[in-house]
Amino acid sequence: MRYGICNLSIVPLRLEASESSEMVSQVLFGEHFKILDHRKKWSKIRLYFDGYEGFINNKQYLEITEENYNELSRSNNAIAGELIDFITDKNGSLTTIPLGATLPLYKDAHFQIKNTTYQYEGSVYNQKLEKEELLKTAFLYMNTPCLWGGKTPFGIDCSGFTQMVYKLCGHQLLRDAKQQATQGEVLSFIEESEPGDLAFFDDHEGIITHAGIIMKDNYIIHAHGKVRIDRLDHSGIYNIDTKRHTHKLRVIKKII
């Protein structure tokens, strides 16, 4: 088995081994993974954090040892807390990183990837936060445009949004909405929910395709066109701009 780590800010994770293939997710700086299949130009990988699989260009990651992979997997790695910031190496070279990037083995404003030590002076998330912090964190992504497979404030999809908000607060969600819907405890009614719980929505075939974070007073924050706030009722999401329902409610889950 081979192992790798992302040393660039935002790298596309594709469905197939091709530049023109659909981007199913993104690999953010500092995320480490197993290399399941290494080819001439592409590698199929499995991310450590959520087990998500896809293809990454071989020029866009560094290979690491199994020992390093295991060390990173055991560590409580810090997460960059600025919308956008930069890191510097010993030569003063700059690399931009987005909100949600991982800072491996972070200590005293420094962290390391292989033999390179970086300095990062921005804020970090490095502990489990209380449930009420979820919505404060969600607001960091307000008005972020929707991007299929996106995970950053420059473009995000509905389940990327819920996953990243929970990740910043120290809690783990799977990547896709239908996967996230398998986690947590089912709530029977909206009235039972608390701010920070998740709502899931299905299509006409009954497949869960959308997720959002419940707020108080029957509002929801979710990624639909952009990260926005709409009304939530027993039918689903009621868009406050178009004055119509856009998503059909399937289930509400309490994760924490």
Image (spheres, rainbow, N blue to C red):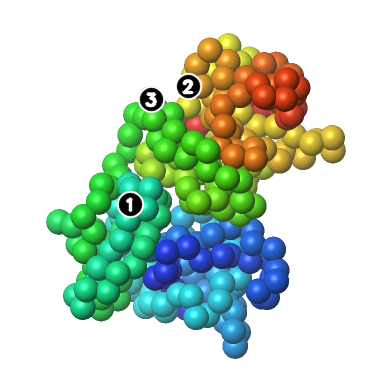
Residue 166 seen:
no
Report x, y in % for residue 117.
Answer: 22, 71
Q: Are marks 1 and 2 in contact (CB under 8 Å)?
A: no
Real-space Cα distance between discs 1 and 2? 24 Å
Q: Is the C-beta separation of discs 3 and 2 under 8 Å?
A: yes
Question: Circles 1 and 3: CB distance less than 8 Å?
Answer: no
Q: Say which amino acid is labelled 3.
A: Glu
Residue farthest front in this picture: 241
Amino acid type, residue under disc 1 in the picture? Ala
Ranked by sequence position, the earlier of labels 3 and 2 is 3
Q: Any mark on residue 132, and which?
A: 3
Q: Residue at x 34, y 68 (%)?
A: 95
Is residue 118 visible to the viewer in this orientation of the structure?
yes
SS at badge 2: loop
**Residue occupying the point 33% across, 34% down:** 129
Residue picked out by circle 1: 80
**Element at label 3:** loop
Disc marking residue 195:
2
Tag 1 secondary structure: strand
Q: Residues within 10 Å of mark 2 (few under 14, many from 20)?
A: some
Query: From what the image shows, is residue 233 above or below residue 51?
Result: above
Identify the amino acid type marked 2.
Answer: Pro
Residue 231's tag is none
Q: Is residue 251 left or right of residue 64?
A: right
Mark closer to the observer (1, 3): 1
Q: Is residue 131 left or right of residue 235?
A: left
**Where residue 163 sits: x, y (%)?**
51, 44
Q: In front: 139, or 208?
A: 139
Cα gap from disc 3 to disc 2, whole angstroms: 7 Å
